[in-house]
Image (cartoon, rainbow, N blue to C red):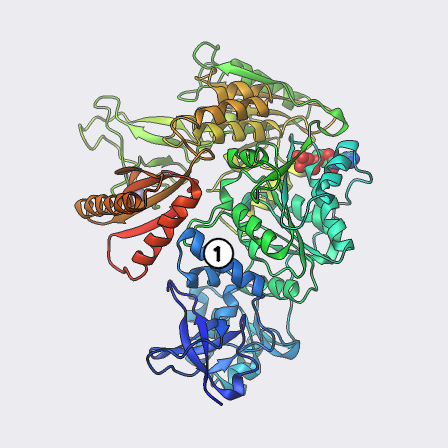
């Protein structure tokens, strides 16, 4: 028999697969989608077979060393999706394929799919480094075993540890006896959500919900719809019912929620509706927990995957529906290569697998709205379904704009612009035993420290942004790189000893509110208070149990929460995001206001929203105050015509970064020239903007320049593919990043 060869993709930034010889004894297991162990230089790595029967390479191919899966780990449809991601976003195929399997699967351990075997599993509470030094001081082999199992995702088959990795039986049992790990007879399937009791879904759909469901039922395979429903209109019930119909038809579903929306409320609604059929892919899961959830989905033991962005790649069998809640959220865009947007990936996946796509939002992105205006039959066209009213016709809360330039301010509030209107409204709500949410989209104590004499502002030494003032503990901190320094007692420029804080942050607001309402129980939710595993959830539970009267927070609190006793939402400074140098600044501000406004008056007591601003005539504010999403979309879409911005035309952001400022600028100029030559050669209708320094011109000591390509998506695609090919072998500095359909231009 002539030798057979396989193409293997490794989970590394490599643009092309490698070719290996398939030894005869592995022929039935080394098939597309299977994990194989292959030699790479002097190491052995796990890769995925993407094709077999390929041509012999020019140089002698090495042999595949082992085939790990009795059944292919990766379904064919997902391999195809990874190829699309790699091509569309100009990212190495290796990085796209890497996303298809949980980290734990990329070890060289076999047995990921077998049902009964003895497994060594680490205790879920991992030892800290100090504890390891202590406990393993005289037992380096135990430590090596512990950390090997840790690297394999927290558990590994005993047989594999002994036969492939050479750990002794006695050593394995000693580690288990020590309590740091245990030996289990079966593969241990952990489910950290097992204890979550479900909220039963509403008994009957409303007429509007029925109409939306009928629209979803009419969708053909590979097509989709936008469900535009105001906050509190019952979109979630539509998702639940649509998913239930898929399950009844024997199909599975994926439900994506924004990272921050994966709250116990969300989990319990899906648990309540589908119980054990749901696998929750929370970002706080350990590698082992994630691997377990993945296995259950792959085997069809769980039929519904609920998760953030990356769940769009969950191996749900016989996929019928992909739901994306709050589809306008920027967290659906991946921040590293492949820089995919889950909404786009979901659309392509739906087409590949014949599933349907359901995008839901109260404040849809302009990209999605534009797709509802395409002629039916266009592959990107979306059907539009509306839920125009809140459940039980509860009114949307009245929004009152407080013009900070003229409104009376409460005395003695220091640098916080605090209107009498907001102060009195909070007092009144608390007096009635109701709850209040205060939004301030700026964490820390103050945005920056400024010397009133010379005007100088303290900047991060490594990034071109001002340092944020923090208290508890008092420190200046960079929100880009984490650089910290003590709060100076005098101005570094002129020696002036008075330092003024500008730009109120959530910490300062918390202090002010606790001074003005000393009896109120106050909670704060921002990145600084939610860094540990389930802290975000704990704060929300406290609000739900009414242990918090006033919840202060950044945009985190605006999303999807449903607390009927919240009757007042105060937006302390609506202008924080209005003037950012990004064409989506107005869209984001509108979305934030509309979302946070939707948190008020969810219950029978009603409620209202107060918005403090110095730009009361801005169209984002005016339309948000009237709850007029349609008018905002029309006005904003008109503004995107000239100069053209998405969705009218598409963008690719080419970002060059490096330590040497001159080199970065020069490289950016060469990149722009190179693009221009290709555009000229092929007569593409694409414009090159720049090169210019990025709005944030330096991050973590690296200077940043960019050139932006603007044009029809198809022509940009040609450029991206050409650029990706020519960058594939580049390992030099400065670094060049291709960001297609960027969500942030900063
Ligand atoms: P949205 O996701 O559109 O903001 P939700 O799905 O959270 O809205 O629904 C708002 C509230 O209305 C929730 O408390 C939900 O339980 C309730 N609700 C939704 N659909 C119905 C229904 N058909 N009958 C009764 N209550 C409903
Ligand atoms: Zn910094």
Location of residue 93 with respect to 381 vertically, above or below: below
Q: Quadrant of residue 396?
A: top right
Where is residue 569 shown, x and y percent of the image?
59, 25
Image side of residue 72 versus residue 681, left or right: right
**Residue 138 visible:** no
Name the quarter showing ligand 2. Answer: top left
Taking the view exactly as shown, the residue that stands out farthest to the bottom is: 1
Apparent side of residue 238 relative to residue 170 in the rendered image (left or right) = right
Q: Nearer the viewer, residue 355 or 739?
A: 355
Q: Residue at x 25, y 42 (%)?
A: 461
* Most foreground residue, 653 or 530: 653
User: SS class of the residue under badge 1?
Assistant: helix
Instruction: Determine whether 95 is above or below 23 in the image.
Output: above
User: Looking at the figure, which quarter contains the C terminus?
Assistant: top left
Q: Position of residue 485 (x, y in %)?
A: 29, 42
For label 1, the residue is 84
Residue 255, given in percent of the width and then of the height, sits at 63, 49
Q: Is residue 238 above or below residue 178?
A: above
The residue lying toward the viewer, choosing from 540 and 203, is: 203
Instruction: Write the residue at 66% across / 45% down.
Output: 266
- Quarter-of-image position of residue 705: top left
Q: Quadrant of residue 134?
A: bottom left
Res 509 visible: yes
Residue at 38% from the left image edge and 81% from the top image edge: 61
Residue nearest the viewer, comparing 676 with 579 = 676
User: In the rendered view, would you say 281 is above or below 435?
Assistant: below
Relative placement, left or right, of 364 versus 47 is: right
Label 1 neighbourhood size at 10 Å, few (<14), some (14-19), many (20+)? some
Left or right of 400? Residue 504 is: left
Residue under the point 74% across and 44% down: 217
- Outermost residue on the right side: it is 203
């Amino acid at each position: 028999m002539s030798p057979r060869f396989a193409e293997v993709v490794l989970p590394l930034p490599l643009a092309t697969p490698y070719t290996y010889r398939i030894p005869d004894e592995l022929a039935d297991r080394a098939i597309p989608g299977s994990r194989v162990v292959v030699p790479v230089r002097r190491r052995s790595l796990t890769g995925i077979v993407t094709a077999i029967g390929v041509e012999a390479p020019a140089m002698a191919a090495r042999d595949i060393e082992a085939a790990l899966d009795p059944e292919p780990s990766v379904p064919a449809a997902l391999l195809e999706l990874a190829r699309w991601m790699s091509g569309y976003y100009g990212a190495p195929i290796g990085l796209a394929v890497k996303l298809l399997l949980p980290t734990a699967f990329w070890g060289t351990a076999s047995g990921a799919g077998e049902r009964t075997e003895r497994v060594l599993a680490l205790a879920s509470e991992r030892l800290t480094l100090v504890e390891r030094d202590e406990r393993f001081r005289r037992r380096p082999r135990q430590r090596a075993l512990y950390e090997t199992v840790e690297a394999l995702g927290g558990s590994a088959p005993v047989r594999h540890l002994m036969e492939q990795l050479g750990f002794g039986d006695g050593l394995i049992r000693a580690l288990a006896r020590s309590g740091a790990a245990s030996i289990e007879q079966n593969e241990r399937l952990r489910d950290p959500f097992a204890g979550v009791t479900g909220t039963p879904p509403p008994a009957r759909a409303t007429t509007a919900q029925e109409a939306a469901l009928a629209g979803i039922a009419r969708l053909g395979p590979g097509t989709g719809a936008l469900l535009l429903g105001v906050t509190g209109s019952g979109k979630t019930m539509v998702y639940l019912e649509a998913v239930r119909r898929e399950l009844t038809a024997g199909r599975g579903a994926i439900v994506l929620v924004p990272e921050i929306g994966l709250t116990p409320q969300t989990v319990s609604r899906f648990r309540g509706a589908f119980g054990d059929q749901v696998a929750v892919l929370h970002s706080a899961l350990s590698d082992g927990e994630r691997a377990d959830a993945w296995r259950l989905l792959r085997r069809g033991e769980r039929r519904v995957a609920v998760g953030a962005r990356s769940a769009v790649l969950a191996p749900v069998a016989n996929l019928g529906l992909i739901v994306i809640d709050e589809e306008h959220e920027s967290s659906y865009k991946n921040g590293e290569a492949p820089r995919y947007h889950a909404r786009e990936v979901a659309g392509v996946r739906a087409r590949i697998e014949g599933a349907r796509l359901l995008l839901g939002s109260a404040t849809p992105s302009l990209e999605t709205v534009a797709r509802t205006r395409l002629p039916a039959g266009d592959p990107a066209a979306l059907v539009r379904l509306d839920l125009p009213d809140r459940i039980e016709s509860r009114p949307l809360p009245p929004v009152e704009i407080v013009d900070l330039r003229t409104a009376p301010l409460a005395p003695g509030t220091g640098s916080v612009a605090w209107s009498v209107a907001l102060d009195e409204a909070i007092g009144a709500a608390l007096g009635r035993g109701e709850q209040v949410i205060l939004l301030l989209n700026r964490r820390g104590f103050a945005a920056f420290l400024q010397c009133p004499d010379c005007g100088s502002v303290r900047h991060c030494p490594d990034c071109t942004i001002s340092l944020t003032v923090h208290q508890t503990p008092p420190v200046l901190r960079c929100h880009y790189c984490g650089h910290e320094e003590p709060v100076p007692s005098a101005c570094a420029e002129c020696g002036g000893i008075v330092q003024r804080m500008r730009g109120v942050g959530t910490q300062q607001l918390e202090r002010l509110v606790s001074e003005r309402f000393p009896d109120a129980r106050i909670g704060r939710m921002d990145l600084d208070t939610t860094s540990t595993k389930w802290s975000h959830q704990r704060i929300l539970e406290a609000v739900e149990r009414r242990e918090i009267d006033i919840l202060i927070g950044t945009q985190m609190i605006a999303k999807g929460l449903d607390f009927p006793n919240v009757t007042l939402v105060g937006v302390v400074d609506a202008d924080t995001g209005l003037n950012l140098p990004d064409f989506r600044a107005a869209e984001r501000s509108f979305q934030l206001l509309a979302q946070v406004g939707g948190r008020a008056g969810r219950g029978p007591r009603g409620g209202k929203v107060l918005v403090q601003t110095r730009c009361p005539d801005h169209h984002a504010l005016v339309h948000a105050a009237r709850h007029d999403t349609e008018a905002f979309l029309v006005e904003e879409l008109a503004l995107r015509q000239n100069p053209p911005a998405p969705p009218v035309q598409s963008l690719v952001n080419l970002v060059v970064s490096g330590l040497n400022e001159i080199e970065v600028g020069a490289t950016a100029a060469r990149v722009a020239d190179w693009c221009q030559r290709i555009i000229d050669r092929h007569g593409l209708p694409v414009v090159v903007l720049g090169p210019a320094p990025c709005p944030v011109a330096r991050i973590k000591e690296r200077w940043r320049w960019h050139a932006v390509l603007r044009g029809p998506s198809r022509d940009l695609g040609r450029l991206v593919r050409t650029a990706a090919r020519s960058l594939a072998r580049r390992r030099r500095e400065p670094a060049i990043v291709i960001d297609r359909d960027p969500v942030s231009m900063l």
